[in-house]
Image: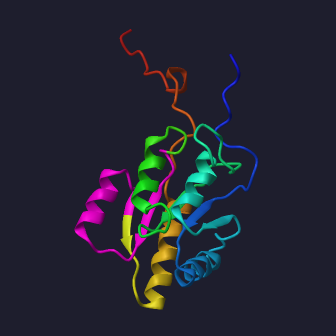
Amino acid sequence: MPNPAPPFSPGPAVDILLVEDSHRDAELAIRALDRLGLSGRLLWAKDGAEVLDLFFGPTAGMPGRLATMPKLILLDLKLPKVDGHEVLCRLKSDPRTKGIPVVVLTSSREEADLWRAYQSGANSYTVKPVDFDQFDDVVRDLGHYWLTLNQSAPARQPQEDDYEKPLDLSG
């Protein structure tokens, strides 16, 4: 039996995947993350199809183009080609990508979008502020929390030997 393809093939190593079709919003987010020193390994995807190609390849069953999984995905919902909800569902349904924190960063205040995002596995849902300074603050806060304060899931499930054995005090 042939060896299965690795989950990711050689390509860019990224910490943050920004999925945003608006050039203005993407530039603002990149500047905000740059002020924290977090934009060095950032990749900007402009539509949902590009994201799916990065992770899963252009053909079903093929590996994607990323060298490593990002530590954080900032995902807009209203995307061309493939909707952000569909991207979220695909990411959270695949064992290789379901552990990546996905923060929905969108202009939508629609309750249906909020509900659907959380039902699909979003880790957070943030509405983009219209004000430049507030937008800057929100993106910096998200980057700081998810990349410096949050403890990410381990790359593999701990095995029984990884756990400390309780002390036997029975005598």
* Residue 63, quarter of the rendered image: top right
Residue 123 falls within the magenta-colored stretch? yes
Image-based side of 10 in relation to 14, left or right: right
Image coordinates for residue 25, horizontal then vertical, percent:
52, 81
- Colour scheme of the rendered structure: rainbow
Residue, x 66% and y 73% (percent of image)? 37
- Number of residue marks: 0
Image coordinates for residue 56, horizontal then vertical, percent:
59, 46
* Rendered position, 146 above or below 11: below
Image-based side of 44 in relation to 127, left or right: right
Looking at the rendering, the stretch of residues picked out in magenta corresponds to: 98-124
* Rendered position, 109 above or below 121: below
Image coordinates for residue 83, horizontal then vertical, percent:
43, 62
Residue, x 59% and y 75% (percent of image)? 33
Specify the farthest residue to the right. Answer: 10
* Residue 103, quarter of the rendered image: bottom left
| Front residue of this view, candidates 68 and 107 | 107
